[in-house]
Image (cartoon, coloured by chain):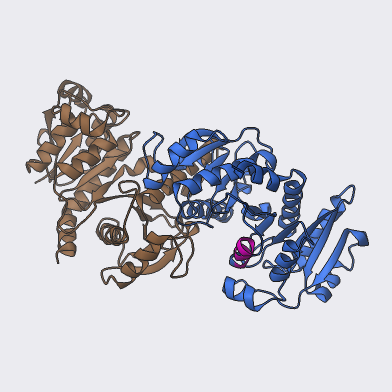
Chain colours: A blue, B brown
């Protein structure tokens, strides 16, 4: 039995959309192997579950009397609000009472929780967080890091590439994912000191299908499956890509491909490099986002991604 | 009399489009105060000028027997090809025989020429190169640096902000341009070490209308008039924005705003911080790009931008 912990109080539409997404997931389940652990204000969750008609064994509720708000200071809030849904979520995860934890709540608190409540996989210097890249053929690529690590060393980028490749291979189902180093030119030797230092590491890394440098213009195309950069660059790139959707919407352009720039629907991608699946969602997550996050957590558990990462980093 | 030097051999469609753009510019001139110095293969230029019917006094031709190709190593090519249009262009500029120099040729050679053939303005540690940002209201913003300085110190960003502001004010005609620091979060204190270090410098700089941090999602919107970042980030952002136009074209989306993501038409923006106007154009420049570059050079000269920059950096 796989048990997925979900913070029902996270996101702008809590708990309604979290409940809705959970119900949708449970209903599409065929064999009922997944058990959802809904963490949050029990009366409120029960009220939203009332009309749902889902099997009672498919979920349980763990009451949390507090909520960490979006604007709160992550470390302080996590420390002071021990009865918050995020604190309880990490407590259950680290105690082995759940196998994964999902939240669309305070991103900082989720990151702090992921880094300090559960272990970082041995050999991983810095866990990373990525984002999906919609591509014209309908597939998804991965951009790592998108903000967890603003300042990086070349070796960090090398590790992000390995973590991203394993995620792309097993969760996105891309065979031998092509890794590109985001840079300001294509030729080897180009770049800032970080990119110049990372290039030879990526090139010599036998775990990677490294295709060399990629430029800004290649990120949204199908050139690399895993686009690697520091978290500062990745964050700017991700938010710029997100803004394209807003512009397209405002200009009333209807286009299937640009619809997929609505990053909300993807829900979120996992923190990679920690010992258990943790997925941090977009603040404005709707039910589809929650459903997708639960699916991703399941895929990570079913494909044993964490063990594969451990193996890759074991010397 | 203002004399603008133009490398007629630079760009993918040389010299045809350079000649066409020059003719267009001359024809729209009312008072004939601008004299164009066309540098390149004389017979070829003359051939393209044959049907033009432009006043003989509006231009002159300086023959260049060599051309630096796009793929050539910048420093080596500039040194070895003393009779190339770029080498002659910088020679004329530094000798005071022209007042500005424009080329859509080898970017690296143009940068090397701008940095070493003419002087950097006293007080400017690192000249910078920017790019226009199309905005939904039809106006243009500026992104600096877009690749000249891959690794920066906080003080460099502070200087890019001053250079960009002066350009925005005098050439883009934006009154008291708002300067935003590209960062991964809005709050002061966020960012990588560079952004954290640059923030207080920008905040305390009385020459700037600093509005604080801006995120990736703000770059294409009308939040700041001058978006400041290191050249690595700026290069990735610019090329990503360029690729949006390609995707929009491929998907046959017709939209006035996205049409303006066709960065080719802007021609190029000047190297800021050097003692004379130097404009580096896009390799695939057509006549409209050349005409625009000549116009920008004229505006820079007419508004005395270089003297204003000198004054701003004089202690």
Most extreme residue toward the front is: A315
Q: Nearer the viewer, residue A225 or A162?
A: A162
Residue at 21%, 52% in the rendered image: B299
Give left or right: position of B276 versus B252. Answer: left
Give left or right: position of B250 versus B242. Answer: right
Q: Quadrant of residue A305?
A: top right
Question: Which residues are the magenta region?
Answer: A109-116
Q: How many marks?
A: 0
Q: Is residue A293 above or below residue A89?
A: above
Give left or right: position of B309 versus A295. Answer: left
Q: Nearer the viewer, residue A112 or B14?
A: A112
* Residue A113: % across, % down: 64, 65
* Residue B6: % across, % down: 19, 36
* Residue B21: % across, % down: 26, 36
* Residue A239: % across, % down: 52, 55
Residue at 72%, 67% in the rendered image: A91
Residue at 67%, 77% in the rendered image: A81
Q: Nearer the viewer, residue B57 or B71?
A: B71
Q: What secondary structure predominates along the stretch shown in magenta? A: helix
Residue at 49%, 43% in the rendered image: B244
Residue B262 in sight in this render: no
Quadrant where the C terminus of chain B is found in the figure: bottom left
Q: Is residue B40 magenta?
A: no
Q: Is residue B210 above or below residue A269?
A: below
Q: Nearer the viewer, residue B253 or A132?
A: A132
Residue B241 in sight in this render: yes
């Amino acid at each position: 039995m796989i048990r997925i912990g979900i913070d029902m109080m996270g996101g702008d539409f809590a708990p309604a959309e979290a409940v809705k997404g959970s119900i949708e997931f449970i209903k599409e389940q065929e064999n009922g192997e997944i058990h959802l652990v809904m963490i949050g204000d029990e009366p409120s969750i029960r009220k939203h579950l009332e009309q749902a008609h889902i099997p009672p064994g498919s979920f349980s509720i763990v009451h949390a009397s507090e909520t960490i708000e979006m604007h709160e200071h992550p470390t302080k809030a996590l420390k002071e609000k021990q009865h918050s849904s995020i604190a309880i979520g990490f407590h259950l995860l680290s105690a082995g009472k759940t196998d994964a934890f999902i939240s669309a709540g305070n991103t900082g608190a989720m990151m702090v929780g992921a880094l300090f409540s559960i272990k970082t996989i041995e050999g991983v210097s810095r866990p990373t967080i990525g984002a999906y890249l919609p591509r014209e053929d309908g597939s998804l690529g991965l951009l790592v890091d998108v903000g967890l690590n603003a300042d990086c060393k070349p070796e960090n980028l090398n590790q992000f590439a390995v973590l991203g490749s394993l995620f792309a291979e097993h969760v996105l189902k891309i065979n031998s994912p092509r890794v590109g180093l985001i840079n300001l030119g294509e030729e080897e030797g180009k770049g800032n000191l970080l990119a110049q230092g990372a290039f030879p590491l990526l090139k010599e890394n036998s775990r990677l299908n490294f295709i060399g440098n990629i430029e800004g213009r290649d990120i949204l195309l199908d050139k690399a499956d895993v686009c690697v950069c520091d978290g500062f660059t990745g964050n700017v790139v991700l938010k710029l890509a997100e803004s394209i959707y807003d512009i397209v919407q405002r200009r009333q352009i209807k286009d299937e491909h640009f619809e997929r720039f609505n990053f909300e629907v993807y829900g979120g991608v996992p923190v990679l490099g920690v010992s258990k699946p943790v997925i941090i969602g977009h603040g404005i997550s709707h039910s589809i986002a929650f459903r997708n996050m639960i699916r991703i957590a399941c895929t990570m558990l079913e494909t044993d991604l964490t063990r594969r990462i451990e193996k890759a980093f074991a010397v």
